[in-house]
Amino acid sequence: MPATNRRTVLQGIGLGGAATLAGCSTRSAPKATQTQKAMNKQKQQTAKRVAAAPTDIPDPISRNESKEVDVTLRPEEVTAEVEDGVTFNYMTYNGQVPGPMIRVRKGDTVNLTFENPAENDMPHNVDFHAAAGPGGGAEATMTAPGETAHLKFEATYPGAYIYHCAVPNMDMHISAGMFGIILVEPEEGLPEVDHEFYFGQHEIYTDKRPGEKGQHNFDIESMKREEPTYVVMNGEKYACTPDKYGAGKVQTGDTARVFFVTGGPNLTSSFHPIGNVWEKLWPEGSLTTKPQTHIQTKQVAPGSTTVATMGFPVPGAFKLVDHSLTRVARKGCMAIVAAEGEENPEVFDPEPKQ
Ligand SMILES: [Cu+2]
């Protein structure tokens, strides 16, 4: 369907046009209560896992010229567990939280296909902070269930950028999981590392207490108060730890680069690697800025990212957390990278001889 016709249809069902853009008129937007009802509907689709695998990242770019990169995003509404025995109706890009990491090079053209599956209940779209154009593509990709939209844009500036859903009730969609990273590598590429990991933090607002068994419904009142039930990395409580899907694995002496995004929609993360520091850190994912060095805790605002490297001089479990630690101890916000290898008592000796 051509874009203009699609918009006409969407406006007809109260979902279209200017109302899709952040902060704009909500003249034809669905009411939040309508969206909440749709979010809390019994879903047909259930998923075993929505947590993105932190190593599921496209390879670093080695080419020296620009090209067109095909990307397909499918907003998928699925029910899955936040933790054992606790289910929630997520909204995702391609069934995972955060959405797939998109990797291009400055000057590349992103050729996006945006497919809103017919079995969905809600309209969705995507706003790329890496796209220079109205709404980052939000209006161009605004689709009702069963529709497909196309968008092309040139990645004109390097950096690690968030993309997220930007329909009128965008806070509800982001808190259900609709955000991810698009990485635009500088022309010269990124420094070589041994490992790369991808993590995204966001809040889940429900009508129950953390850990209370059963289906948790989305609760707009707790979102308005900004009091989430869960604060999670990669969509689920402690998803990327040995107790759930496993920790990231490295060897002592390796270097790792972490791509981190705060989806929010409301809380700023104080991103910290316990037992380590960020050796080099590119604030706000700005890859044209010189990195900061030896940073303990970095605030990452909703709608922003950070890129940071860490080393592993000694073996052990290195916990990546939001240093607002109640979110870690009680609300699920932690990932682990485990380093294996020889002890290095000169650097760190947990059992010194007396
Ligand atoms: Cu959405």
Image (tube, helix red, strand yellow):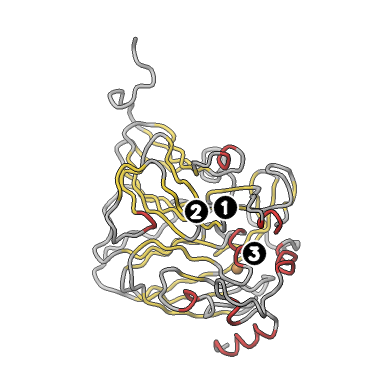
Q: Which corner quadrant holds the C terminus?
A: top left
Say which element carries label 3: strand
The residue pinned by badge 3 equals 77
Report if the CB atoms under discs 2 and 1 are less than 8 Å apart.
yes
Percent of width and height locating residue 332: 58, 43
Q: Amino acid at mark 2?
A: Gly
Percent of width and height locating residue 276: 37, 37
Residue shown at 41% from the left, 47% from the top = 298
Residue shown at 68% from the left, 43% from the top = 210
The residue pinned by badge 2 equals 200
Q: Which corner quadrant holds the N terminus?
A: bottom right
- The mark found on residue 235 in the picture is 1
Percent of width and height locating residue 213: 74, 44
> In terms of sequence position, does the residue under pointer 2 or pointer 1 come before the other?
2
Instruction: Estimate how packed mark 3 is, as few (under 14), some (14 to 19) or many (20 or more) residues with alpha carbons within 10 Å.
Output: many
Pick whichever, 232 or 220, lies toward us: 220
> In terms of sequence position, does the residue under pointer 2 or pointer 3 come before the other?
3
Left-right relation of 297 to 124: left
Residue shown at 51% from the left, 54% from the top = 52
Q: How far is the residue under mark 3 from the one under mark 1?
A: 14 Å
> In terms of sequence position, does the residue under pointer 3 or pointer 1 come before the other?
3
Q: Amino acid at mark 3?
A: Glu
Q: Amino acid at mark 1?
A: Gly
Left-right relation of 348 to 21: left
